[in-house]
Image (cartoon, rainbow, N blue to C red):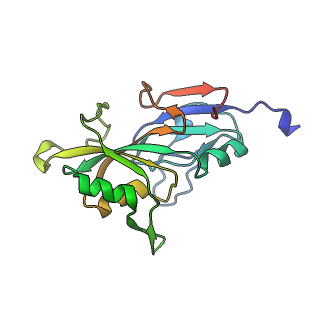
Amino acid sequence: MENNKKQQHFIINKPYGYLSQFINNQTKRKNKKLLGELYNFPEGTMAIGRLDEDSEGLLLLTTNGKISEIIRSKKVEKEYYAQLDGVINSEAVNKLKTEVEIGINGGKYLTMPCKAFILDPAPSFPERSKKIRDERHGPTSWVSITLTEGKFRQVRKMTAAVGFPTLRLIRVRIGQIHLQTMKFGDIIEVDSLIA
């Protein structure tokens, strides 16, 4: 009977400050904002992968676990725009592209080769609800990083490892699905998440 139920899929632009989950499992801070506050999602909806509370952008949701597995696989690219502390140079970008040593679960991990380039001009996103910082703290720059893996806080760890900590992180693409003109908090129900 379960198989006859229509599967539902959603594309959302996750705003800053929301957890990529529907139930707060944290014991320390109970006042977390959850995805269910954005929309009345059907029972059984799950986020495909996650975005940290302080990350923004493209998040796919589905009621179909098989679709979730396919999209989370290493075959599907995930592209992020990161606003960095300082003006990144080509040497640091080249390090990002090849491999960077980051810490994962108390051990060392070498990232897989990825695509990375400087975004010039910088993308124009609306101000974040919590201000990043002001110009007195020095210049910032933007970089695009496209991964096929997704370790915990990987993009942030990678940019910090090459000397340019991430100030703001926005996922703009998963596979063939782009953020395009979606505003933060927008939710679109779609027939399929796989081209």
| Quadrant assignment for the N terminus | top right
In terms of depth relative to the viewer, which is nearer, 58 or 5? 58
Q: Is residue 110 visible?
A: yes
Residue pictured at 26% horizontal, 49% vertical: 84
| Spot occupied by residue 164 in the image (x, y as percentages of width and height) | 25, 56
In terms of depth relative to the viewer, which is nearer, 7 or 32? 7
| Spot occupied by residue 91 in the image (x, y as percentages of width and height) | 25, 57
Farthest right residue in view: 1
Farthest bottom residue in view: 107
Looking at the picture, does residue 105 appear above or below residue 35? below
Residue pictured at 52% horizontal, 58% vertical: 26
In terms of depth relative to the viewer, which is nearer, 37 or 110? 110
| Quadrant assignment for the C terminus | top right
Position of 63 compared to 167: left or right?
right
Residue pictured at 71% horizontal, 40% vertical: 64
The quarter holding residue 158 reads bottom left
Residue pictured at 84% horizontal, 37% vertical: 3
Position of 138 compared to 11: left or right?
left
| Spot occupied by residue 109 in the image (x, y as percentages of width and height) | 45, 69
In terms of depth relative to the viewer, which is nearer, 3 or 34? 3
The quarter holding residue 10 reads top right
How many marks the image carries: the answer is 0
| Spot occupied by residue 39 in the image (x, y as percentages of width and height) | 56, 30
Looking at the picture, does residue 59 appear above or below residue 148? above
